[in-house]
Image (cartoon, rainbow, N blue to C red):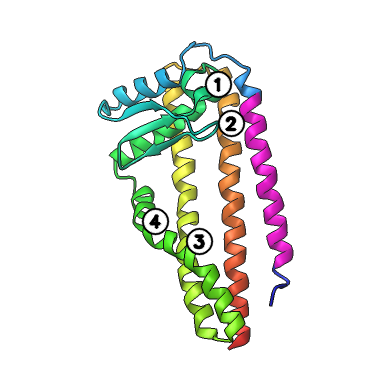
Amino acid sequence: MFFHPMDFLIFIALGLALWAQTKVKGNFQKWSRVRASSGLSGAQVARQILDQEGLSHVRVEYSKGGDLSDHYDPTAKVIRLSEPVYRGNSLSSLAVAAHEVGHAIQDEHRYSMLVLRHRLFPLANIGSQLAPMLFLGGFLLGITNLIGVGIALFSAAVLFQVVTLPVEFDASKRAKDKLLELGMIKNSEEKGVSKVLNAAALTYVASTMMAVLQLIKFIMIFRNRR
């Protein structure tokens, strides 16, 4: 019930996820010590790119959520940046700020994968909360159909994570393109920006791998019990 051969692969994916988190922090700290040649802060970069894209209605705010809590809120049309990113003028600060602006640009242009992710969110949220209880109830009570319902709900959560991958990679590409296009970084500084963004992307890849493997595990268990 509690152990399955797929768990070996899940443990490997978990190890990759933990390593990816370490890489994110390490790369952010490393390139936080490298000042961008433009001297612009993350807040200034976000504001200038937004204005250049005709998104003056999108606000840029300081977030008290702590380091790496940066995000774009599509409902409020606000980009919230943590203190090191908002005030900092390092390559890390510019990379993260521009990445969040990338999401705002996606939202404005109704980027298909972002639209799909927004539509999946309610079901994925329900699935991630209820699926574990349905799995456990199905195992303990011996009701196979409960496991099946849990799999269906968990599939929505997994699909949400899969769709998140192209959304994040696209936002990073938009970020690098805009930073270069507007002269906010030089070509020689692109390496540092890429290191920061690629490390962050790896965390999404690792978590998606783990979720997919867990889904496969439960499907295999479901089929065996039937």
On residue 196, the disc is 2
**Segment colored magenta:** 7-29
Q: Report the residue at 48% width, 18% height from top.
A: 87
Q: CA distance from mark 2 to mark 3?
A: 25 Å
Please name whichever residue, 111 or 50, is drawn nearer the observer in this view of the structure. 50
Residue at disc 4, secondary structure: helix
Q: Which residue is mark 4?
A: 121
Residue 146 position in % (x across, y down): 50, 80
Label 3 or label 4, whichever lies nearer to me, is: 4
**Mark closer to the chain start, 3 or 1:** 1
Residue 21 inside the magenta-drawn segment: yes
Q: Report the residue at 59% width, 86% height from top.
A: 142
Residue 69 position in % (x across, y down): 50, 35
Residue 33 found in image quarter: top right
**Mark closer to the chain start, 1 or 4:** 1
When the figure is inspected, residue 137 is found, relative to residue 176, above or below; the finding is below
**Mark closer to the chain start, 2 or 4:** 4
Q: Locate the N terminus and report the quarter of the image it occupies.
A: bottom right
Q: Answer few, some or many: residues within 10 Å of disc 1's Cα (few below 14, many 20 plus, some between 14 and 19).
A: many
Please name whichever residue, 1 or 169, is drawn nearer the observer in this view of the structure. 1
Q: Which residue is mark 1?
A: 91
Q: CA distance from mark 1 to mark 4?
A: 32 Å
Label 2 or label 4, whichever lies nearer to me, is: 4
Q: CA distance from mark 3 to mark 1?
A: 32 Å
On residue 158, the disc is 3
Q: Amino acid at mark 1?
A: Leu
